[in-house]
Image (spheres, rainbow, N blue to C red):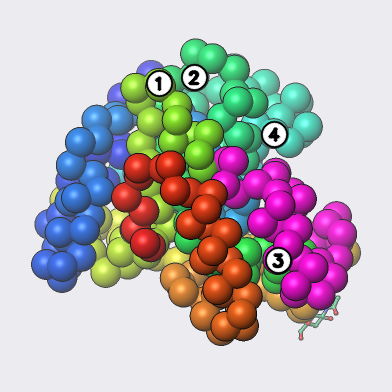
Amino acid sequence: NTNVSGVVSLFVFFLLGGAPEDQGKVRGAFAQKSITNPTITTCVILSGTTWMQEIVPLILSQGDPVVVDTVPNWDRVPWLHNNKALHLNLDQRPSPRVFITHFQYNMMSTGFLKVIYVMRNPRDVFTSCSHFSRMASFLVSPGTQTEFLNKFLDGKVIFGSWFDHVKGWLSATEQHIMYISYEEMILVGRLQIQLKKKPITDRCVFKNMKKNKMSNYSLVPNTIMDQNVSEFLRKGIAGDWKDHLTVAEAEHFDAFYQKKMQDVKYNFFWD
Ligand SMILES: *[C@@H]1O[C@H](CO)[C@@H](O)[C@H](O)[C@H]1NC(C)=O
Ligand SMILES: *[C@@H]1O[C@H](CO)[C@@H](O)[C@H](O)[C@H]1NC(C)=O
């Protein structure tokens, strides 16, 4: 019953302010998008899912922050892959229904409507995943960095291979998939987002989401996610891998990436 043309407005309004070089990049990325009514946002783990759980509800509420201030992110944009989803009566939620998942493309049922697929430089995903694996008690310890890097490249981490995930979703034939990257979402902070002349940029900025207790996982007990070991929402930047990978590891990563991605035509923001 709520009629929303969220995502398009977001990106149209992206273009109203900010540095010209940023605008050029954003425009390039969004020129051909025609999604008006998002239903599912999906990505590899640690690529901006939590952030989308903040931005999309703010667009749907036309910038009214009540929903993000009062409802935990996992209830405002529920996880499809979590068994909690079985008890949330997802099909009875009011329209537009927005869900989130880490499912790979071949795990999706057919007939989904609109998808926002979020990607992030896999070197930063690896970096984030290393920190996450140390703080989340439900994950096995990452071991040494070399061991964990090999596991990551081989897809032996939660939700599988970054490469399979991204290649799968990029090969999707459905019309209504919008591809966006974490790196582009960072630009939100530098550009104005306005909906019906109401600026919502502030609430969409990573550092402000980080202060929102409904979004920063401080509601989760320390025994499950120990934010004293590593914060769940850390820096919200691109390129943190440069402080994390050794030169040799970065070269190994590059070689692996080139080989795996050589047949992919998509113009990634980080390449
Ligand atoms: C989460 O947000 C609350 C409220 O702003 C803040 O007190 C807390 O330090 C934040 N936690 C983390 C881990 O960022
Ligand atoms: C985490 O750190 C905070 C503040 O430094 C402290 O109050 C709390 O007891 C710590 N929690 C655990 C589980 O160590």
Rendered position, 163 above or below 123: above
User: In which of the image's four quarters is ligand 2 placed?
Assistant: bottom right
Instruction: Determine if the magenta segment contains residue 153.
Output: yes
> What amino acid is found at the position of numbered circle 4 in the picture?
His
Please state the extent of the stretch shown in magenta in the rendering.
136-165
Describe the element under mark 4 as helix, strand or loop.
loop
Mark 1 or 3, nearer chain start: 3
- The x and y percentages for residue 124 are 54, 67
- Assess whether mark 2 and mark 1 are in contact (beta carbons under 8 angstroms): yes
> What amino acid is found at the position of numbered circle 3 in the picture?
Leu
| Residue depicted at x 75% and y 72% | 146
- The crowd level at tag 3 (other Cα within 10 Å; few <14, some 14-19, many 20+) is many
**What distance separates the C-alpha of mark 2 from that of mark 3?**
34 Å
Q: Which residue is mark 2?
A: 112
Q: Which residue is mark 3?
A: 149
Q: Which residue is mark 1?
A: 174
Q: Which residue is mark 4?
A: 81
**What distance separates the C-alpha of mark 4 from that of mark 2?**
15 Å
Which quarter shows the C terminus? bottom left
- The crowd level at tag 1 (other Cα within 10 Å; few <14, some 14-19, many 20+) is few
Instruction: Between label 3 and label 4, give the one nearer the viewer.
Output: 3
Instruction: Between label 2 and label 3, give the one nearer the viewer.
Output: 3
Describe the element under mark 3 as helix, strand or loop.
helix
